[in-house]
Amino acid sequence: LPGNHDIGDVPTPFSIAEYKSCFGDDYFQFWAGGCRFLCLNSQLLVEEALTTPELKQAAEAQHQWLTQALSTQEPQPQHTVAFMHISPALDAYDEDTAYFNLPPEPRRRLVEQLRAGGVSRIFAGHFHREARCDAGDGLEIVTTSAIGLNLITKPGGDRRNLAGIGGAVMSESVSGCRLVRVSATGITDEYVTVEEMKR
């Protein structure tokens, strides 16, 4: 999935084309074990970043693709999960706009669309820290820290904005990944550090 380090905070038609030439589609879906997984280009969800008619057209194309994908329920998925780089929300669904989340209007539009399509979990990154948010109606937003550099929030700082960064750390006791277990009855997840993986 493309993120700001791949196609920029403000993507360009060129940066998206370069990404696609190296990695394939910038949004897509796949099925595994009877579950559907939707992968989105969240850089196209930040309206301030859509600075050209081509980017606005790309954002609309992704929206139309997602609408079509969610309207197709055959076969009936056991679970539907979405992945994206920028988290719609970190701590509260109605939180203010910040660098590390989506602005309220694109957030609302996307989350309502995903809820209506039966998505129960959104997994995101970008934040370089852990966060979890209940988006209502059984939809949970899970933001995972990084396998590499993790950010530290300065005391009293707003962790959702760049000004709230108080430092960074990259160590096996902090860096890690999310282990997700999918079963017929539900989805569970936990953050596992590199140190814990070695045990």
Image (cartoon, helix red, strand yellow):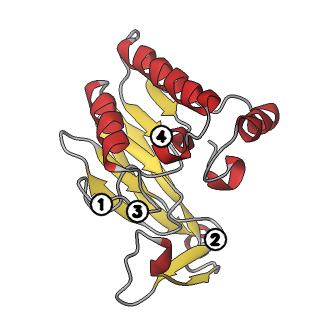
The residue tagged 2 is 198
Instruction: Name which residue type carries label 2.
Output: Lys
The answer to whether the residue labelled 2 contacts the one labelled 1, judged by CB atoms less than 8 Å apart, is: no
Please report whichever mark, 1 or 4, sits nearer to the chain's N-terminal start.
4
Q: Residues within 10 Å of mark 3 (few under 14, many from 20)?
A: some
Please state which amino acid type lies under the numbered disc 3. Ala
Q: How many marks can you see?
A: 4
Q: Residue 28: give x, y in percent of width and height.
A: 58, 26
Labelled disc at residue 104? none
- Secondary structure beneath dot 2 equals loop
In the picture shown, does residue 127 fall above or below 50?
A: below
Q: Which residue is mark 4?
A: 45
The Cα atoms of the two marked residues, 3 and 1, are separated by: 6 Å
Q: Are marks 3 and 4 in contact (CB under 8 Å)?
A: no
Count residues near mark 1 (Cα–Cα under 10 Å), then give few for <14, some for 14-19, many for 20+. Answer: few
Amino acid type, label 4: Leu
Q: Which residue is mark 1?
A: 96
